[in-house]
């Protein structure tokens, strides 16, 4: 289950303590970073905090309310333990992990609850309304937009409602290929239970190990295989959501023309209207074949054209990712330098030969192409896509680079933890636009990021990849690095960079978020994103479902 466990969880950063990034066996990565950032990595700027170093005020919720909460959910499912409170008061954004390394928590939750049944949630929300408490839904806690942090100053207390007990696949309907899944189930829990019956959901975000179905739905998430399987909004058929004014239970039908979609209004609602308890999801047969390959293009634009062409010609891969020049070079620096030395020498010889033909990992564009499904279907699709890529200048590298990416796709997030400790500003930002605007938006946001990053220290590294693609356009996912600003100015530096990138996204035709959600970090741009009338409509819905602003206040909707 998704309960945080003291001694196992890296509550101040990403993932579990027993997992780390293996930099020692990647001898090229540190020289690459030194050259690009102009830094020496010979000392820690930050050290990992301990709980004893964190100061928390006593819970503001009184004994009478605590007694009622224990009666509703059982004493074992109510905690004011310091570890649990600290673990549930922030997400995993750069701002969050930076503040925790500074031993700084401005807004702690007062109590953590683990409800077991939907009727308990109904009672908890009723009590919260009566006692002027805020309730914050908590799935895996992987939000990078401030989605789980207490925000309202006028509340008498904050309840973090951890959905970890709602972690089962309740039933699988083989005839319709759907499954009813509880909202607190983490990615591995969902896949384990579905795989046992021969199915997959097909939703694999980078946060897969540490995020839950309810969070995916509440933030309109996308997985790395979304090009083939669809985004989470495409996968959901129906859901149940408890609001302070009652339970919403949408109809389990494949499609309906009965007015605007209440289902899709709940998807993306970020806990500000209610708590998703379960959903009926579309599932697929577990693939017979997982075919992941690498290709290299001479430049980013050529690779973008290849993705657009394959999708518009009806050749839809399960996964296709294209890295720009900087990210391609970074990926090359991440290559393992251990193992069979003859194999490594052969790879180096092949890379030199490729470079002589104009395909360089120093200034080319690397593509991961993934196909999943029945063998005959995969082989047919692979043949067509590779033929198209060759026509557009792509060079097929075979299965080895694709398999390597697939094996290590959840590991690189752990490297961020060490980089932050060394004093590196490292973060991501994502957007999406149509194909006709993609390269223009790519360049403008990249330029805005570099300008803002270099304002303080004069050095930066900005990489980008196309990650989730559609017939009409694609997302752009930036990863950026720079030396941290002077002590005490780190958060101010990040604010400036985030603002510059967000303003460029808005000015040049992107969306403020393709799949990370809104939280409070992106809320200031929501009026520009959706327009004034649409924003008023969302606020009106909030007023009907949650008139006392119990649910996750301060998120999704801008303050003014």
Image (cartoon, rainbow, N blue to C red):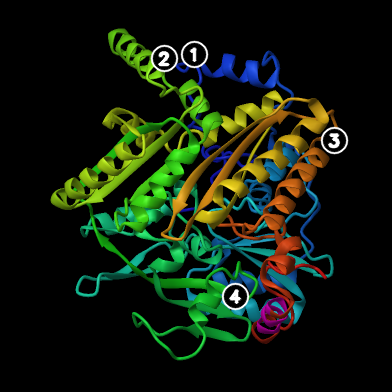
User: Can residue 337 be seen in the rendering of this structure?
Assistant: yes
* Residue beneath disc 1: 27
The residues colored magenta run 534-541
Residue placed at 65% from the left, 60% from the top?
A: 518
The label nearer to you, 4 versus 1, is 1
Secondary structure beneath label 4: loop
Residue 382 on image: x %, y %? 23, 44
Secondary structure beneath label 3: loop
The label nearer to you, 4 versus 3, is 3
Mark 4 / mark 1, whichever is N-terminal: 1
Main SS, magenta region, reads helix
Mark 1 / mark 3, whichever is N-terminal: 1
Report the Cα–Cα distance between label 4 and label 2. 49 Å
* Residue beneath disc 3: 489
Report the Cα–Cα distance between label 1 and label 3. 32 Å
Task: Examine the rendered structure and indicate whether residue 53 appears above or below residue 39.
Answer: below
Are there few (<14), some (14-19), or many (20+) residues within 10 Å of tag 4?
Answer: many
* Residue beneath disc 2: 337
Residue placed at 68% from the left, 53% from the top?
A: 89
Secondary structure beneath label 1: loop
Secondary structure beneath label 2: loop
């Amino acid at each position: 289950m998704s309960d945080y466990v003291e001694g196992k969880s890296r509550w101040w950063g990403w993932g579990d303590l027993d997992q780390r990034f293996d930099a020692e066996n990647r001898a090229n990565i540190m020289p690459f970073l030194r050259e690009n950032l102009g830094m020496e990595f010979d000392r820690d700027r930050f050290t990992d905090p301990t709980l004893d170093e964190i100061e928390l005020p006593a819970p503001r919720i009184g004994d009478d309310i605590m007694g009622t909460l224990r009666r509703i959910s059982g004493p074992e499912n109510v905690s004011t333990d310091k570890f649990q409170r600290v673990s549930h008061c922030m997400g995993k954004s750069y701002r969050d992990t930076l503040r925790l390394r500074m031993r700084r928590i401005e807004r702690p939750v007062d109590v953590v609850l683990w409800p077991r049944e939907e009727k308990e949630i109904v009672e908890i929300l009723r009590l919260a309304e009566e006692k002027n408490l805020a309730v914050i839904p908590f799935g895996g806690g992987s939000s990078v937009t401030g989605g789980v942090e207490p925000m309202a100053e006028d509340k008498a207390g904050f309840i973090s409602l951890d959905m970890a007990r709602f972690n089962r696949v309740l039933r699988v309907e083989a005839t319709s290929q759907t499954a009813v899944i509880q909202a607190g189930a983490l990615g591995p829990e969902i896949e384990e239970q579905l795989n046992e019956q021969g199915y997959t959901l097909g939703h694999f975000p980078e946060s897969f190990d540490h995020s839950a179905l309810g969070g995916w739905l509440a933030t309109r998430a996308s997985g790395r295989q979304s090009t083939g399987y669809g985004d989470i909004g495409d996968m959901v058929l129906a859901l149940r959501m408890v609001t302070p004014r009652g339970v919403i239970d949408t109809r389990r039908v494949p499609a309906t023309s009965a007015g605007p979609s209440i289902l899709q209004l709940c998807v993306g609602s970020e806990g500000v209207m209610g708590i998703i308890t379960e959903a009926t999801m579309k599932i697929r047969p577990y693939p017979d074949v997982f075919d992941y390959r690498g290709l290299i293009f001479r430049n980013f634009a050529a690779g973008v054209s290849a993705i657009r062409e394959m999708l518009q010609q009806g050749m839809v891969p399960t996964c296709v990712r294209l890295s720009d020049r900087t990210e391609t070079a970074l990926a090359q620096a991440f290559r393992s330098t251990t193992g069979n030395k003859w194999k490594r020498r052969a790879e180096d010889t092949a890379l030199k030969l490729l470079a002589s033909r104009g395909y360089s990992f120093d200034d080319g564009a690397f593509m991961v192409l993934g196909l999943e499904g029945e063998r005959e279907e995969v082989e047919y699709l692979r043949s067509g896509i590779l033929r198209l890529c060759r026509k557009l200048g792509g060079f097929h590298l075979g299965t080895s680079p694709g398999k390597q990416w697939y094996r290590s796709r959840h590991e690189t997030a752990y490297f961020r933890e060490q980089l932050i400790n060394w004093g590196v500003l490292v973060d991501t930002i994502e957007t999406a636009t149509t194909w006709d605007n993609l390269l223009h938006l790519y360049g403008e946001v990249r330029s805005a990021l570099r300008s803002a990053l270099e304002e303080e220290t004069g050095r930066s590294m900005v990489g980008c990849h196309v990650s989730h693609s559609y017939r009409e356009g694609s997302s752009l996912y930036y990863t950026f690095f720079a030396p941290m600003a002077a002590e005490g100015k780190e958060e101010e530096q990040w604010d400036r960079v985030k603002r510059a990138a967000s303003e460029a996204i808005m000015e040049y035709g992107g969306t403020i978020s393709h799949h990370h959600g809104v939280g409070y970090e992106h809320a200031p741009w929501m009026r520009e994103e959706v327009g004034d009338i649409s924003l008023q409509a969302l606020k009106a819905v909030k007023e009907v479902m949650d008139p006392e602003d119990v649910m996750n206040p301060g998120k999704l909707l801008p303050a003014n």
